[in-house]
Amino acid sequence: MSQDHQMTVIEHLQDLRKTLIISISAWLLLTTASYFVFQDKIFDFFTLPLKEMDLKLVILTPFEGFMAKLKAACFAGLFFALPVILWQVWRFILPALHTKEKRYLLVITPASLILFTAGMAFSYYFVLGVALKFLIITAGYGFIPMLGASKYLSFVISFLLPFGFVFQLPLAAFFLTRIGLISHKKLSAKRKYAIVLSFILAAVLTPTPDIITQILMALPMLLLYEISILISWLSRTKQKPDISP
């Protein structure tokens, strides 16, 4: 291996180290700020669906309250650090990209962040509350709801994240169409398989086994699939006319 190539590898590893240090530092800094400065507001955000049902969280161990708020702060810190993390990833892979790839990534990166946020917002405002009410009401009489703080936080986070990833579907359709791997015709032809797959994924991704919650996730997935077909059609590359004799 030549000395120049060794230096290139070393520089590449140093750049990767810098990317990881900055990304992790941003997450830790914003997690710390979330815990010590914005702790009450963040926890109010997570517990708002319970307040609408006049429910409060309980702690079953002395350590649980601390862990619940730390878990909320870690999640908030990661979310707020995403722009920094994505920028560091962008800076790291930029030298290896061609001009066309850079242009695509420049569009896809902010769009992905927006869609991820939109997916979690949709889950929070339209699905989480309905799922909680359904699960608590169907428990029936004879039970007093006593939700442990730490497990409740895990439940909410496991609800928000899948919707964030599912909302990436239109963006994936745009990118895969532009590089020629799929087309709107192929997506339309596979619609019946998409319906089955949506309910399978909903059953896997939702943290509860009830059919109502799974339907609440599957229906947006089906709508996103239809939107993906439209986006695939709009972003299709035009074929050059054949002028050969």
Image (tube, rainbow, N blue to C red):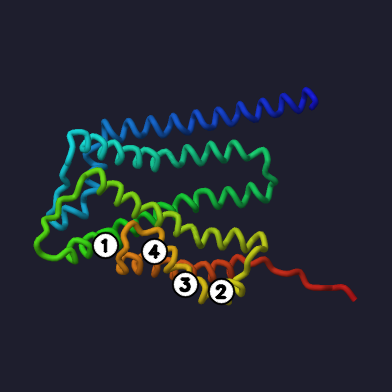
User: Label 3, on which residue?
Assistant: 196
Residue indicated by mark 2: 190
> Callout 1 environment at 10 Å: few (<14), some (14 to 19), or many (20+)?
some
For the residue pair 136 and 121, the one nearer the viewer reads as 136
Q: Residue 205: x and y, percent?
A: 40, 58
Mark 4 touches mark 1? (CB < 8 Å): no
Select label 1 or label 3 by which is in front.
3
Of mark 4 and mark 3, the one earlier in the sequence is 3
Q: Residues within 10 Å of mark 2 (few under 14, many from 20)?
A: few
Looking at the image, how many numbered discs can be counted on the residues? 4
Residue 52 in percent (x, y) is at 16, 57
Q: Which residue is mark 1?
A: 131
Q: Specify which label sits upstream in the sequence, 3 or 2.
A: 2
Residue lying at the far top of the rendered structure: 3
Of 200 and 104, the residue lying toward us: 200
SS category of the residue bearing label 3? helix
**Quadrant position of the N terminus in the picture:** top right
Residues marked 4 and 3 touching at CB (< 8 Å): no
- The kind of residue tagged 4 is Ala
Q: Is residue 107 left or right of residue 178?
A: left
Q: Residues within 10 Å of mark 3 (few under 14, many from 20)?
A: few
Residue under pointer 4: 203
